[in-house]
Image (tube, grey):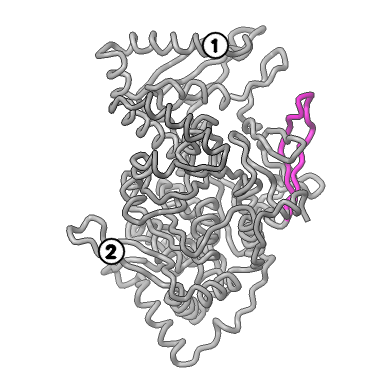
Amino acid sequence: MGDNENRRVYEARVVKNFRELMNYSCKNFAQNIAYKYKKDYTAKNIEYIEKTYEQVGKDVKSLSTELLDMGLEEKRIVLIGNNRYEWCLSYFAITTGNMVVVPIDKALPENEIENLVKRSEAEVMIFDKKYLEVAKKLQEREDTNLKILICMDKTKDKEVLNFQELLEKGEKLVENGDKRYDEIKIDNDKMAIMLFTSGTTNEAKAVMLSQGNICANITDFSSWVKLYPTDTLLSFLPIHHTFECTVTFLYGFYSGSTVAFCDGLKHIQSNLIEYKVTVFVAVPLVLETMCKKITKAIEAQGKTKLINKMIKISNALLKIKIDIRKKVFKQILDNLGGHLRVVLYGSAPMNKETVIWYNNFGIDLVQGYGLTETSPVIAAETDKEKRPGSVGIALPSLNVKILDPDEKGEGEIAVKGPSVMLGYYNNEEENKKSFEDGWFKTGDYGYMEKDGFIWVTGRKKDIIVLKNGKNVYPQEIEFLINKIPYVEESLVYSRDKSNTDTMLCAKIVYNEDEIKKALGEKTEKEYKEKIWEEIKEINKTLPVYKHIKSITITKEPLIKTTTQKVKRYEELKNV
């Protein structure tokens, strides 16, 4: 039992493996729509495809039965592709059929895909057509175990198995009385998912997760934040990533909700509207971009003063339990789809002002915090307890503590509980480094308030230690820089000035259109001078040791992972 067992907001339905999760949902939400998507979003006449829970259950059983018939029980299967029905089907068919799924990031360059397939020792690869050539090349290589290739799309290649045909073969086997799938016994505690960390540090580590790990996380999270069978979620974050996979795909399925597949990053806003999305699982960068866009539109219409006045009135009425936000801010809410009930976000911290901005219009934001190694959620705000800027409280079955806290109570965040990974695959050195007396060390720095609310102040690896022993968390200063209207993003880093001092520097990415609107057509040197004036103003609000002493400016975005975390180690090579 965790420290916050008594703070459960809802009674959770306990699931111990994906078989239990599937069986319950397919039976109890049989006629609900599990997945909704377009056959081809580029076509003139849009055709929507809908899959009921009952249909998903049948398809999973058919595909899994065929994979078992191919002798793949306990084998490792790489899964790579877009967020799509076939990906979800494959994930369930692999794991509920006692095979190991290895989800790989679809945005990786070819050499990285090759490296991870080799390291996973997988014998099978299920993929989008886009990866056909890579898959064939890997199959031919002697240093991989790859034997079987399955393409989710039709291909003329005779050596590659067709996904649809395998599904149909499996269906016939089930119709003819094949009971192998029903007889499978799931070991909740053995590795069922091998995941590679997203790589904000150099070498991606192979994380071993069990079905028990992820199901404990879903059970826990369901007693913090409620999803309903009437909810629709938009799946747009990379589905291989534990945050999207656990919260949108698996928790959505557990709850009987509908998952709609996004047509792409550019289409988020239109998809929110057309699918009547009620729950949005996002990362701060997307939420901050949407906030900036809408704020600029309000300014362009000359309505800023009016909106601010209405916010004050509405917040005053909320204190006496009168909520007028849906009516008063209808136009703004319609820009976000008009049906948005709650936004769940994680993966990186978000500034407090953005959270309050959404709250002002009646949209609930719930921040979560976690890592791939923890399946992933460690802490989250609940439907009842929120504190903007904090990452919430530890989930009910988890224990969290701060290791070696300093005089302010800050130290490394450590966690213990059923959703912590089995370990890193083939990496004893990292396993020894990452665990201390059964506690997993997250590599994140933070502190915990007396009532259990956790604040993350930065990655241990990112902290800049000055010569006077003071710690600087770069993210804290980056938040302030990113508030400059024409700044897209920034990176704060240190440079040794001499033997006695450390100089803080910032690489700043500006938005060309916005800076031109604000300052007119000028040279880059003049833009830099203007940004430097803004930095001097920020410096005035900070203690001297946190002052930025030098800046560089660019239009080029910072290098990021697919979940939009800045790859600091890559960027620091370029400064």
- Magenta-tinted stretch: 398-417
Residue 7 seen from this side: yes
Residue with the mark numbered 1: 539
Compared across the picture, whether 508 is left or right of 181 comes to left
Residue drawn at point x = 50 percent, y = 89 percent: 178
Give the farthest residue toward the bottom: 176
Sequence-first disc among 2 and 1 = 2
Say which quadrant the N terminus sits in.
Answer: bottom right
Which percent across, then down, holds residue 497? 58, 9
Residue 106 lies within the magenta run: no
The answer to which of 104 and 212 lies nearer the viewer is 212
Q: Position of residue 165 (x, y in %)?
A: 35, 77
Residue 539 vs residue 114, the one in the foreground: 539
**Magenta span includes 415:** yes
Type of amino acid under label 2: Lys
The answer to which quarter of the image holds residue 409 is: top right
Mark 1 Cα within 10 Å, few/some/many (few <14, many 20+)? some
**Residue 201 seen by the camera:** no
